[in-house]
Every structure is written in C-alpha cells, then in structure tokens.
Image (cartoon, rainbow, N blue to C red):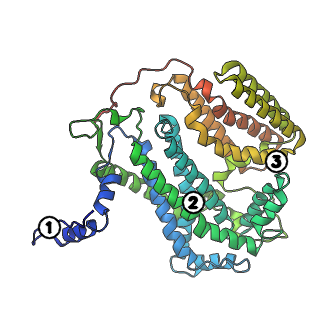
Amino acid sequence: MAFVEKKLPADAPVAAKALNWVDARFPLSKLWNDQWGAYYAPKNFNWWYIFGSLAMLVLVIQIVTGIFLVMHYKPDATLAFASVEYIMRDVPWGWLVRYMHSTGASAFFIIVYLHMTKSLLYGSYRKPRELLWLFGVGIFLSLMGEAFFGYLLPWGQMSYWGAQVIVNLFGAIPFIGPDLSLWIRGDYVVSDATLNRFFSFHVIAIPLVLLGLVAAHLIALHEVGSNNPDGIEIKDTLGPDGHPLDGIPSHPYYTVHDIFGVVIFLFVFSAIVFFAPEMGGYFLEFNNFVPADSLKTPPHIAPVWYFTPFYSILRATTSDFMYALIAGVVAFVALIWLKSRLSGKIKAIVAVIGLIAIAGMVVLDAKFWGVVLMGVSVLILAIMPWIDHSPVKSIRYRPDWHKYVYILFAIAFVVLGYLGVQPPTPTKTTVAQICTFIYFGFFLLMPWWSAMGKFKPVPSRVTFHPH
C-alpha cells in the first residue's frame, strides 16, 4: 500500500498535525477507535462491568510501583529484608510505594474475583466467548504465579516459611516430586538461589506473559463483543449505519462511567494505603515484619488470603477424606452412565479413568491428592464453557433456585478462604471437607443442574432503563 498522509489546512492545530503525522506512520487513531473510541458496547451495562477497567488500572499501579521498588530492592538473602526496611524508612516516599504495591496485590485479586463473578452470573464464558474466557483463566493463573513468586521477596518469616511449605508440596508428586522441588528452589532449602529465581520470575518472566495474555484478552473481547446482563448478542440487531441498535460508543459514555468507578476505587484504595495497609494481617502478615529465620518456624504458616480457598482444599484432603473422595468418584461415574447422553465409548473411557483414579487414591498418599485437588480446583474453571448446558446465559432468565446454587457456591468459597488462614482443628477440617465437596460439586454437576428447571423467556432486545 502506498504511503498516504492527509492534507490538513495550513491553520490546523498543532495537535491535529502531529496526530496526522503519527497516523500516517502508525495506526494510533485506528487502534483507539477499534479498541475503545468507536467500539460499541451494550447500553445496559451495570456496575458489575466496572471491574475490567479497574483491573487494568491496578495492573498499571503494580507495574509502576514495582519499577520504583526494584530500584532499591536487593535480591540477596543477606540484604533483601534490610533493603525493604530501607525502602520503608529512608527512601523518600518509599513507604507509600511499598504499601501501594502490597495493597495493589490484594486489590488485584479482589477485582479479578468480582470480575469472574460477573462472568458466572451473566454467562460471559459462553459461546462465542470461550477463547476470551480461556485467556481470562490464563491471566488468573499468571496472577497467582506472580503473587507467589513475589511473596518470597520481602524475606520475612511468613515469606520464607510460606515459600518453603508451598515448594515442598511438589515433593508429593510421585517419582519426579523431590527433584522438581529441588529444581524450583535451586537448593535443598529455600535460600539465596531461590530468592534470585523468584525475583527473576516476578520481575521479568511472569509480567511478560501477563501483559501478552491481557492484550490477547482485550483483542478477543473486541472481536466477539461484550456480553451484557441479559446475555443477548447485540450484534444480531444492527441499524442502517451497521452499528448495533442496542449499543453505544464506549467513549464518551463508558469513559465517564469508568472514571466514576475509578474515583470510588481510588478513594477506598487510598484509605487502605494510608490507614490500614496491613488490613489486620490479611494484606501484610505481622510475621513478615520479622526477618526470615530458618531455625525458627512460625506457630501457624498460611499463604496470603487470596490463595487460602485453594490451600484449604489441600489441607482438607486427609487420609480419612480419601474414602469420601472414592465414594464421590463412584457416584459421579454412575451418574454419567445413568443420566448423561454421552456415547457408550466415552462412558467406558470415563469408567476406566474413574477406576484408575480410585486405584491411585488407594495406593498414593493423601498429600499427593491434596496437591492434585488444589491444582484442579483452579484449572476446572477452564472447562466452564463446555459444562454449562443452560439454554440461557444470564442468571436473570434462569430458574430462581439457580441463584441459591450460586449463593451456596460463594459461601463455600468464602468459608474455605477463611479456614485457610486459621490454624487447623478437627471441626474446621470437617467444615473444609464439606465445602470442598460443594466447590467441586458446583462444577462437576453443572451439566445437569444448569439445564434443570423452568427458564424465563429471553427478550429479543436488551432491557434498558435510562437513568
């Protein structure tokens, strides 16, 4: 294509001339219009749709504050804790940057969990947004990796021993476990080699992957279009100009909408940073203000709150719990044989997999299955587009009792998160085991319960009430 530069009047503003010069060499205006300015979004967005923009804001906060922290941080086992204290006490405004970064980590997960809740409620993972959902799950996994690798860097007591416990979990994997744990640590214990590895992953490797997935997530979103609270495809009803009749340009309408949400978020975020950055020990554990000591184990080791639901599943998997798991596998295989429409060949494959799993549960240690269940509890999110058989997307048009299923799932998830930060007791372990069954039952039984009940008619156009 030949090089073309628009001819502007001689008295055109300098900014217009500069933009024209750039557009002739780089599609800046086209990118802005495709991704936001002229992107038509459903006009019935509600407050649930603010969390995508907030996640982008927090990502920027984390990158910028992380850059300033790296300027003064020393990834050395003998200097790491002191360098953090130096940032907090001697670097001008260092305490603010550090607290913004630590609070931003928790804020990121709060926002992402709420963003995923919106997707569950309104079916944003359903066709044609399966790939969009998979990119989102990839972002969630990358965030977990980023948080885990960054967790060790302050080199406090909880950082050190938390990393020790989590890395040792890989040792439960048969055959390769001990060597895998050794490879991750770079030493026989968490040491300077571990700190350097985790620093490299936290600062370079994972952020590159995360940024790539975020870009892919946004491109996929604007390719298939945004979902809405009604779960209706607005691209099916176009006006004479080729734009959706039920859509409005993101700019300026949702720009103003998002700015309002950003102001509210920054108000809450600032209040936490300035008045309660530790958030009672949930955002920053009190033990992490004590230098790491390999000879002194804290009385209770637990990961940060955003990992604790999955950590609870790990702790709930005891030797006694294995009998309940075996019974659950038998019941699930029987359900597939009796109530699914799968072919006989696939049913036979499922039965064989079930028998292998049962045999493994008898032979292998409960600790190994705890690690498996902890990993599966996250990865199971990826199959949601293919296990939700509801004829409608949005919770608005599902049977009312479906709402109670979601509420029960949310309660189980929150209870698992709470129990994960508490010292284990027999009663708490039993409650965690019950919640673990509820958690996995929500997903594994979804092909059946999601299609049950009387569904409400879905309108042909989105429901919208002007403010």
Which quadrant of the structure image shows residue 179? bottom right
Label ID, residue 7: 1
Looking at the rendered structure, the secondary structure element under dot 1 is loop
Query: Whole-percent x and y of residue 6?
Result: 18, 65
Badge 1 amino acid? Lys
Cα distance between the residues tagged 3 and 1? 68 Å
Looking at the image, residue 58 sits to the left or right of residue 429; the answer is left
Q: Would you name the residue on which mark 3 appears? A: 368
Crowding around mark 3 (Cα neighbors within 10 Å: few <14, some 14 to 19, many 20+) is: many
Badge 3 amino acid? Phe
Crowding around mark 2 (Cα neighbors within 10 Å: few <14, some 14 to 19, many 20+) is: many
Crowding around mark 1 (Cα neighbors within 10 Å: few <14, some 14 to 19, many 20+) is: few
Badge 2 amino acid? Ala
Quadrant of the rendering where the N terminus is positioned: bottom left
Query: Whole-percent x and y of residue 136?
Result: 53, 48
Q: Residue at x 76, y 37 (%)?
A: 433
Q: Would you name the residue on which mark 2 appears? A: 105
